[in-house]
Structure formats: C-alpha cells, structure tokens
Image (tube, helix red, strand yellow):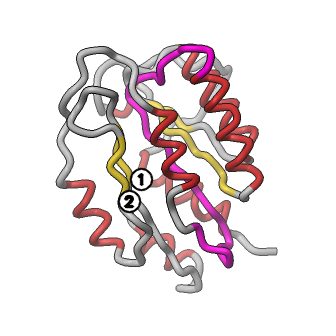
Amino acid sequence: MSFSRVEDDNGQQLGIRVSTNFYRDEGDDYVVKPYPFTEDVEKAVKQISEQRANGGGDFPEAVDQALDSAIYDHEWSEEARARLLFLVLDAPPHHDSSIVKRMQKLAQEAASQGIRIIPIASSGVDVNTEYLMRFMAVSTGGTYIFLTDHSGIGGDHLEPAVGEYEVKALNNLLVDVINRYCETG
C-alpha cells in the first residue's frame, strides 16, 4: 500500500504507526507471530515480504488468537486520530460456538478502545465468516472489505451477500478507507 499517498492526502500531518502480525493455527510453526508498532513502514513491508504461506492441514485458522494478540498485546497510541486494525483472512476461524462468542467479545473490547476492525476477506472465506466479519466491522465502526473474482488475486472468491457493490483496486480502496477514518472535523 502506498503510505506516501495517505501522507500526501493528509498534508503530511499523520504520524503513521504500523504493526504486522501473522497467524496460522494450532500445530503449525506458530499460531501468532506479532511485531510491535513501528513508524518504519519499510520495516513492516519487509516483515510482510518475508512471510510464506505454509502449514495448515485443516482449513480454519486461529483468527481469534490473532485478534486477541492485536488488541491486547500491542501499545495502541493514546493520541491516535484513528486506530485501524486490518484483519486479513483467507480461511475462516474455527466455527466452534465458544470461539465465535470470543470473537464477538473481542470486537466489543476493540470498540471500547476505539479500534476499528476492517476485515479483508479473500478466497476461502465462507458465508458464516462473512457475516461474522461484517458484524465485527459494524460493531467497531469499521468497514468490511472483500476481494472479488475481478481482483485476479487468489482462487475463487465468495459471491458477496450484498446487493450492489463497487469494485476498486485494493490499494486504492485501502488508501480511501484510511483517509476516511483519518479525516478531522
């Protein structure tokens, strides 16, 4: 993503801090691999580029544990104009009722801390996950983003359970979302 576009659009007035966090599932090389917030965007981009898809065996992933880590184990800025948590997933969380309830409670905690959850769903997301992610976005004042087959990224994507929607390049959409939440006044 072009953070320089976000900075340019906001008159260089944003102090952007990012944290990359990766998750898999129980039994994989790791469940959650968190990195602390940094102002060094290039460092975060490097962390992302060093990751490789691996592991699995079963389809659901430890989405709840990643969300818990992102909310509780990071030093969110007290002065932030916006606290945005982009939750990228290409597989559903475990659909055990206790995990779904836990994710709902995590969304409530995020909202109480002023953290907006912005799920980004891609191939592998099922209808139940779409509804859970939409709930998390709405309950925290975030936005649900989903990839479509137009994107050319990943495998087949779930046809969204909404009427009309606008297709945009992901990078442009993310810049628009960040700018919208960082507006003042």
User: Label 2 amino acid?
Assistant: Met
Q: At x 48% / y 72%, what residue is drawn?
A: 17
Position in image of residue 68 (x %, y %): 54, 44
- Residue 114, image x, y percentages: 72, 58
For residue 89, above or below residue 3: above
Disc 1 packing (10 Å; few <14; some 14–19; many ≥20): few
The residues tagged by marks 2 and 1 sit, at their Cα atoms, a distance apart of 5 Å
Disc 2 + disc 1, Cβ < 8 Å: yes
Q: Is residue 126 left or right of residue 132?
A: left
Is 93 magenta? The answer is yes
Total numbered labels placed on residues in the image: 2
Q: Secondary structure at mark 2?
A: loop
Circle 1 is placed at which residue position? Answer: 171
- Depth check, front residue: 45 or 172: 45
Residue 75 lies in magenta, yes or no?
no
Residue 75: image x %, image y %? Answer: 54, 68
The three-letter amino acid code for the residue at tag 1 is Asn
Within 10 Å of the Cα at label 2, are there few (<14), some (14-19), or many (20+) other Cα atoms?
A: few
Of the numbered discs 2 and 1, the one sitting upstream in the chain is: 2
Residue at 44%, 69% (x, y): give it: 37
The magenta-colored residue range is: 76-98
For label 2, the residue is 1
Is 137 positioned to the left or the right of 58 in the image?
right
Residue closest to the far bottom? 12
